[in-house]
Image (cartoon, helix red, strand yellow):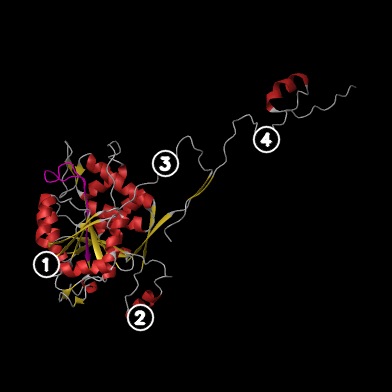
Amino acid sequence: MEIQPEQPDLPTRSLAVAQAGGAPDRISAVQSGQGIFPAQRPSLSLISSAQLLLAGDGEAVPQDWSRALARLTAWLELDLCHVPARPAGALRQVAAWAASGRAAPAVPAFLPWQNVSPVALQAGGDAGLPRADWVVSYLHDQGTGKPLKASTLDLVLMSPHPAACPMDADCDAPLPRAETMQAMLHAAHAERRKRIAIIVDARRRNALVRQMLVAGRIAARDEQEIEILPIEDALCHLVRHAGRWDAIIVLPELRSLVFAMLAEVTGIWTPWPMLWHRRGLSMITGEVLDEADGSLPLNAPLLVQALALAAHHAGLGHAARRLMQGASQLWDCGIFTPGRGSVAPYATEVTDIEFIHHLCRGGGRRSRASMSWRAIPAAPTALSPRKPRPALQLVANTGE
C-alpha cells in the first residue's frame, strides 16, 4: 500500500490546486486576513441611554402636557426622570453657596405650563416669584406674516431679578449688581449674540454706564456691540425693526413695556420659554403678558423650545438639535399652530397636539434646510469621506 505524504495547508488562492493534485478529502487552511469572504473592519461602539433629569413631581404635570411630553421623549429615545425638588431652606442655601465650586449643577424644574407675567417683576417683584438672579425669555420664529416677511426672528429678552437690584446711592433707585450684568452679558456672548441693547430709564442710565466702565466691560467692546439707551428711544427702534438687536437687557420695571411692544410688532402673543438662572439654570416656565393665574393650555412651540433648552443645558445636544430641526422643517413647510403664522405659500393651521404628532412622524423631512437657532449650537462638522473614520466610538451618558 502506497502512503502519500500529508499535504501542507495552503492559502485560499491555492484551493483549486490542492483539490486537483492533493488529498481530495482535505480543505486547506485559510491564512489570517485572506478568508473566502472579504475581511470586515472590526469596530466597537459603547452606547448608553440618554437620561434627562428634571426636578418636580411627574404626576403634577397637566394631562395634555404630559401626553405631548411623553410622545416627544419617546421619539427622542430619552429616559425622562423626575427627581424631588430640594427645599429652599436658609441653611441649605448657605451650604450650597459655600460649596458652589464643588457641588454638581442643580437639576432644573421643568414647568413650561406655569404662567409668569412680566408685570409680576414690577414694583420689587411679587412675593410668589421664584428665587433667581436673572431671567431670560426666547423669541424665536421663522416668519409670522407681513411684519417680519420671510425673516427669522432670534431674540432674547433678559432682566435681572428684582431681588438682584439693590438701591444705588448715586441715582437713588434700584440698580442691577455688576456681577448680575456680567452674567447676562456672558450668557449672550456664549450664544454668539453680538448686538446687545440695555434699556433703562433716564434716571439710571449714567449710573449703569459708570458701573459697566468700572467693571471693565469696555475691554470686550470688540466682541459685543452694546447700546445703553432710554426706554423711549428703544421702543421707537423696536417699532421700526424688531430684530435690530440679538439680545435685550431691560430693567424689571420696564420689562412689561418691551414685552408688549415685541408681541405687538411680531404678532406673537403666545407664551415664550422663560429660563430662571440662579448659579446656573434653576427653572423653565412660560412667559406671557396675561396676568391670569393657573396652568397654560398646551402650546406646542413652547413645549418644543423649552424641552430643547432643557436638553441642551443637560448636555444632550443631539436631542435638542433634533427637536428644533424637526420643528423648523414643519414651519418651513407651512404647518403652524394658532398664534404663530407662516410665510409659506401653502399654509396649514393645526392644533398643538397635531403639531406634536407631525413632528414625531417626520412630516417636514422633505423641506429645505432651515436656519439655526443661536440658543442651540450647530452640530459638529461631519468627517470627510476621504478621512478614515474611527473604529472605536464612545457615547457617554450625560444624563447623570
Residue with the mark numbered 1: 202
Residue with the mark numbered 3: 382
Residue with the mark numbered 4: 32
Pointer 3 or 2: first along the chain: 2
- Please tell me whether mark 2 sits on a helix, a strand or a loop: helix
Q: Which mark is residue 91?
A: 2
Q: Nearer the viewer, mark 3 or mark 2?
A: 3
Three-letter amino acid code at the position of disc 4: Ser
Q: In this view, does 240 lie above or below 86?
A: above
- Whether the residues at callouts 3 and 4 have beta carbons within 8 Å, the answer is no
- Please tell me whether mark 1 sits on a helix, a strand or a loop: loop
Pointer 3 or 4: first along the chain: 4
What's the distance in space between the residues labelled 1 and 3, CA to CA?
Answer: 50 Å
Three-letter amino acid code at the position of disc 2: Leu
Instruction: Classify residue 289 by image quadrant.
Output: bottom left
Farthest top residue in view: 20
| Along the viewing direction, whichever of 295 and 307 lies nearer the viewer | 307
- Residue 251 seen anywhere in this rendered image of the structure: yes
Pointer 2 or 1: first along the chain: 2
Quadrant of image for the C terminus: bottom left
Task: Provide the residue span drawn in magenta.
Answer: 141-159
